[in-house]
Image: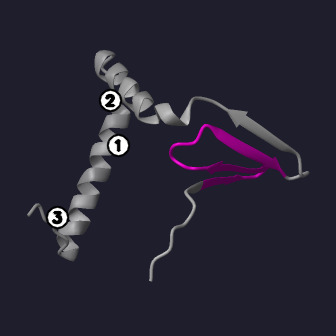
Amino acid sequence: MRSKMPKRGVVAGELGFITVDNFPRASTATIQYLDGTLETIEAGDTSKALQYEIEDMQRYIEEKGNRETLNLSLDVMDIMSNVREQWGIKYSFE
C-alpha cells in the first residue's frame, strides 16, 4: 500500500507553531500564535528553489563557508554510513 502525503514541515514552539506547506520548495510559511492570530511570511519563488540552492553553494565555496556547518554535515554522513553498514544496507548501482 502506498499513498502520497503532503510535504509539510511544522515547527512547534512555546508561543505557537510554524507550518510550511510544499516543503522543501515553499515560498510561504504560516505562523499561528497561541491566541489564534495568524501571520503569513512570503519569500522567494518556488520555481527558483534549485537555483537558490546552487547560488548558496557557490557563495559557500567562494567565501570558504562556515566550517562548523560543513563538519556537522560530514559527521551526519559518517553516522548514516555506519548505520547502513551495521544494518547491511547497500546501495545498488547496477
Q: Is residue 28 above or below residue 84?
A: above
In the image, what residue type sits under mark 3? Tyr
Report the residue at 28% width, 60% height from top. Answer: 80
Q: Is residue 60 left or right of residue 86?
A: right
SS for dot 3: loop
Q: Please rate how many residues cluster around mark 3, counting C-alpha atoms within 10 Å: few if below 14, some from 14 to 19, many from 20.
A: few
Camera-near label (3 vs 2) is 3
User: Looking at the rendering, which quadrant does residue 31 occupy?
Assistant: top right
Q: Is residue 38 left or right of residue 42?
A: right
Q: Please identify the residue farthest to the right as the structure is shown.
A: 35
Please provide the residue range marked out in magenta.
Answer: 9-33
Q: Please identify the residue farthest to the bottom as the structure is shown.
A: 1
Report the residue at 22% width, 75% height from top. Answer: 87
In the image, what residue type sits under mark 2? Arg
SS for dot 1: helix
Q: Please rate how many residues cluster around mark 2, counting C-alpha atoms within 10 Å: few if below 14, some from 14 to 19, many from 20.
A: few
According to the image, label 1 marks what residue?
A: 72
In the image, what residue type sits under mark 1? Leu
Q: Earlier in the sequence, mark 3 or mark 2?
A: 2
x, y percent for residue 24: 51, 46
SS for dot 2: helix
Quadrant in which the N terminus is drawn: bottom left
Q: Characterize the magenta stretch by its predominant secondary structure.
A: strand
x, y percent for residue 69: 38, 36
Quadrant in which the C terminus is drawn: bottom left
Per the rendering, the mark at residue 91 is 3
Q: Please rate how many residues cluster around mark 1, counting C-alpha atoms within 10 Å: few if below 14, some from 14 to 19, many from 20.
A: few
Q: Is residue 83 left or right of residue 4?
A: left
Q: Earlier in the sequence, mark 3 or mark 1?
A: 1
According to the image, label 2 marks what residue?
A: 67
- Give the spatial CA distance, label 3 vs label 1: 23 Å
Q: Is residue 85 above or below residue 71?
A: below
